[in-house]
Image (cartoon, rainbow, N blue to C red):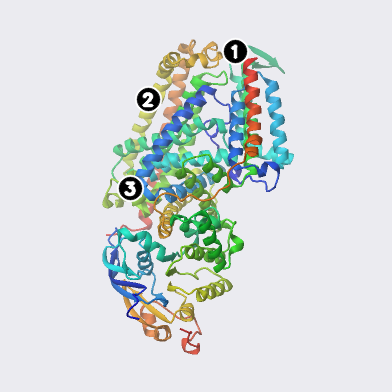
Amino acid sequence: MHSTPESVAVEDLTFSYPNGHAVLDQLSMTVKPGEKVALLGPNGAGKTTLALHLNGVLELQAGSIKVNGIPINEDNLSEIRRRVGMVFQNADDQLFMPTVREDVAFGPANLGLTKEQQAERVREALDAVDAIDFVDRTPHHLSGGEKRRVAIATVLAMHPDVLVLDEPTSGLDPFGRRELANLLKSLDLTQLVITHDLPLALELCPRSVIISNGRVVADGPTPEVLADSQLLAAHRLELPYGFSPAAIAQPEP
Amino acid sequence: MLRLFFALHAPDGFLSTPVAIATAAISFAVVGFALRQSGRELKDKQIPLAGIAAAFIFAAQMFNFPVAAGTTGHLLGGALAAILLGPATGALVVTIVVVVQSLLFADGGLSALGYNILNMAIVTAFGGYAVFLLARKLMPNNAGGIIGAAGLAAAASVVLSAMAFSVEWLFGATAPIDFDNVFTAMVGVHLLIGIGEGCITALAIGAVVASRPDLVHGIADLDREIVADRSPVPMRTFVIGGILASIVMATVVSQFAVDSPDGLETVAEETGFADQAEEHLLDSGVFADYAVSGVANESASLAIAGFSGTAIAMTVGYGLFFAVGERRRRKPAPA
Amino acid sequence: MAGAHQHLLLPGTSPIHRLAPEAKIVGAFLFAVGVSITPRTAVWAFALNAVVVALAMRITGYRVRQAVVRFAAVLPFVGFALFIPLIAGGDQTQVLGIGLSIEGLWASWNVIAKATLGTGASLVLAGSTPIPDVVRGLGRLRVPTVIVSIVAFMFRYLDLIVEEMARVRVAMTARGHDPRWLWQAKPIATSAGAMFVRSYERGERVHGAMLARGFTGTMPQMDHRAATLSDWLLSAAAGAISLSLATLALLT
């Protein structure tokens, strides 16, 4: 373990928006290669801001971030953006091209791949999310669950090492949520899942981190974190009515 | 439905070929400039922001608002786009909307794109923005003044568009109707349309100023405290401002109507445009009988302009007074 | 909602549907130019052009009733045109006891004929070409990539914004808002402002999503099948007909 670098290493990350509002306050955390980590916390805690830092959409103000041991800086942004795939909360923000095919090809095209390589990436990524049938559709005409899967494909097409998902199950119907959970389980990548869906966190991620007021306030095995009802209540989190993490078998690591 | 039927979406062959070519050349050059300028302002955000702003303007044009007794009008959005996004991006965005409407919705002729872009996008965006900057100097430097200036700018942008069309008509008429008549009718009608455009634009800008003042390009120079100053403009300022604006508009409009045909006639002759214009234009005595028809039209246009100008200023003023006052009542000013 | 800007596409696979979009755009444009420059006295040229338009609309799959409805866009201009003979100067003629200007009648004919034919050409283009194809066509016509991309983004987000606006409208109506006069339009106007803020913020989020996938400010080159020679020939035919008719009319 010591020989391979951490997949993501965040150290003392501090960030305020231009209007002076401080969002992240010396936040530090690490994620090991292949690990699946749930990022929990109330609205406005800084989860999305952290995610936007991880592939360099927001510029570093203070602190440092390393991806696979490489520190993020101006010069290696494109490399970082290839390695860290970011799936945004609203799939309509992520799917901006006229057709699914062009949208999935957008990232590979920016990487400078040839047309043939782009086509191969599109096929492979859409296959992985079981959405190859939508290839010539307009994103606007897909259902919520379909959009979410295509959004993941747009990121997979860049062959990332780390997948960052912002609220992947919000707005999905129960069946769409199930399909998505199964898809994420099947993907063998380091994953950081920002979510309010605590059962999803339990099912998918062996480890959970709670962020509140821009700091890490809890970090541990998901069943333990979710069993601490005082901790959850202190950070505006709540398990669904009748749901008990202890009653569920622990996820296979 | 109060649809802008003369200047908006003119069909193929509505103006003569030389005018179509000349306006196409002007539009091409200005849009090229606007494209570069907007690229400098927005940098790598240009494509997503201008694209979504174009969708917004397109959608705003599809959306009806009530005018009178249940009839509806719709926004043109040139001044709105310019105040929110800056004149260059504003003109670019409205141009794209106009072109797409012509290409995909059969609205406005493909060979008429030159004058349609000039009248509906370039004149409204750059003209409207110029009026906005001017009006802001005359208005109090607070949220109320910004909203009032936006209303005046939007109303003026529609009138300017009508004027631009009239001037194009002078050079490229395809029907024997006097410039005076076209000008008076166009400006008169568009002063009325301008009232709706002014009110809706003022209130829309007001809503943006209230929630995200940093997104309004036209007030980028102001600091937060000034923008946050929501004290309603005193009624007296409004009345005086409205009357002043009306007088200014009436003077400008009537002077234009009285003096310009002479000036434009000279220009037309010097540039040879007059020869190319349909001969009847001269036969029927646009210029020959000017003394008589000119006087009649002078008072007519003065009356219309004066009346409409006052109406615009008062309506915009009233709406603004109402809007600012109401918002203040609803949301007590933060300390 | 104004009916003027509904999508005009007629789904189908006619020979006109199958033409490359860039060729169709150029063809429609040339046809419109040809119609515009045709002297108004060349009635025979307009008649032949009308046959071309009618034929193209027929092939595209327009039914008569559909076609009539879609020509409604020119109605305001027809109204204006019918008004011209009453107010225009010059020699007069008497029709049913009403004095009409002969010049004005010609002008009226000129506006109606050209507007109708030009709109017909646009309707063929719009009826046979899906929106993404038009966008691609513009790209292949060497329209600057920035503009083509802006157009593509516009279409991607247009329906979203329109639906959002419609939802706001429904919410207003559901609470009894039924404005009939301009001074009651405040909620609508402020909702337009709110819609701009939402649109702009969406634009910024989309920009973030683009950066996240390696966007550097220029759109990457992707696709495409270019127009074949026969596409060009077929499309150019429409333009060529109207242009040559115009030339012929100008010469005679």
Is residue B217 shown left or right of residue A109? left
Q: Residues within 10 Å of mark 2 (few under 14, many from 20)?
A: some
Q: Residues within 10 Å of mark 3 (few under 14, many from 20)?
A: many
Q: Are marks 2 and 3 in contact (CB under 8 Å)?
A: no
Work out how far the residue at label 2 is from the one at label 1, CA to CA, in angstroms. 32 Å
Which residue is pictured at 51% across the width and 23% down the height?
B182
Nearest the eye: C115 or A124: A124
Q: Are marks 3 and 1 on the same chain?
A: no
Which residue is pictured at 28% across the width and 52% down the height?
B224
Chain on which label 3 sits: B
The residue indicated by pointer 1 is C90
Nearest the eye: B70 or B78: B78
Q: Quadrant of the N terminus of chain B?
A: top right
Q: Are marks 3 and 1 in contact (CB under 8 Å)?
A: no
Work out how far the residue at label 3 is from the one at label 1, CA to CA, in angstroms. 54 Å
Labels 2 and 3: the sequence-earlier one: 3
The residue indicated by pointer 2 is B251
Nearest the eye: A31 or B165: A31
Task: Report the amino acid beneath label 2.
Answer: Thr
Work out how far the residue at label 2 is from the one at label 3, CA to CA, in angstroms. 28 Å
Task: From the top left corner, tell me how far across and down residue B115 is, in percent.
Answer: 50, 30
Task: From the top left corner, tell me how far across and down residue A123 is, in percent.
Answer: 56, 62
Can residue A116 be seen from the camera position used here?
yes
